[in-house]
Image (tube, rainbow, N blue to C red):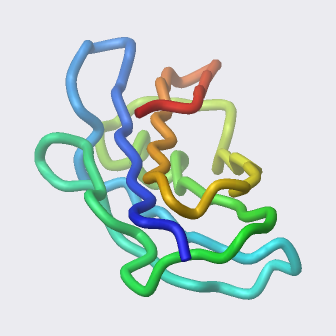
Amino acid sequence: MSKVLSTHVLDSTTGNPAQGVHVQLCASDGSPISQAETDSDGRVAELATAGLTPGIYRLIFDTGTYFESIGQESFYPEVTVTFRIDNTSRGYHVPLLLSPFAYSTYRGS
């Protein structure tokens, strides 16, 4: 089982953490594993408290509702990040840099 899976969402248009973004963790077949909302620092500290086995997973970020809540038009109603867990002895961090019309992600530490 992997140690920790965390995420951080930053609104790159304001340079502020994106608070209140709903995040869902799903298995490769789409079945939900867990869900959470980003805190005041735009973070979810742990999405898979029981750990994850090697495999492919998806994080689905509800970006449309977030931008709607701050009165901002946006193009992407959600962002799905698909990633692979190979080494279960380490933690995984998947940040999302977000703007109304673009996004990027990377494997964090």
Q: Give 70 or 98, whichever is nearer the viewer.
A: 98
Q: Residue 45 falls in which quadrant of the image?
A: bottom left
Q: Is residue 40 left or right of residue 90?
A: left
Q: Residue 86 falls in which quadrant of the image?
A: bottom right
Quadrant where the image shows the C terminus: top left
In the image, residue 20 above or below residue 68: below
Q: Position of residue 19 (x, y in %)?
A: 23, 47
Q: Position of residue 90 (x, y in %)?
A: 47, 52
Q: Residue furthest right?
A: 29
Q: Give 59 or 11, whichever is nearer the viewer.
A: 59
Q: Residue furthest left?
A: 40
Q: Residue 28 falls in which quadrant of the image?
A: bottom right
Number of numbered discs on residues: 0
In the image, residue 23 above or below residue 32: above
Q: Residue at x 64, y 55 (%)?
A: 87
Q: Position of residue 75 (x, y in %)?
A: 67, 31
Q: Position of residue 47 (x, y in %)?
A: 41, 69
In the image, residue 38 above or below residue 51: above
Q: Residue at x 58, y 75 (%)?
A: 52
Q: Residue at x 21, y 23 (%)?
A: 16
Quadrant where the image shows the N terminus: bottom right
Q: Is residue 91 left or right of residue 37?
A: right
In the image, residue 9 above or below residue 65: above
Q: Residue furthest front?
A: 89
Q: Is residue 39 left or right of residue 89?
A: left
Q: Residue at x 41, y 30 (%)?
A: 72
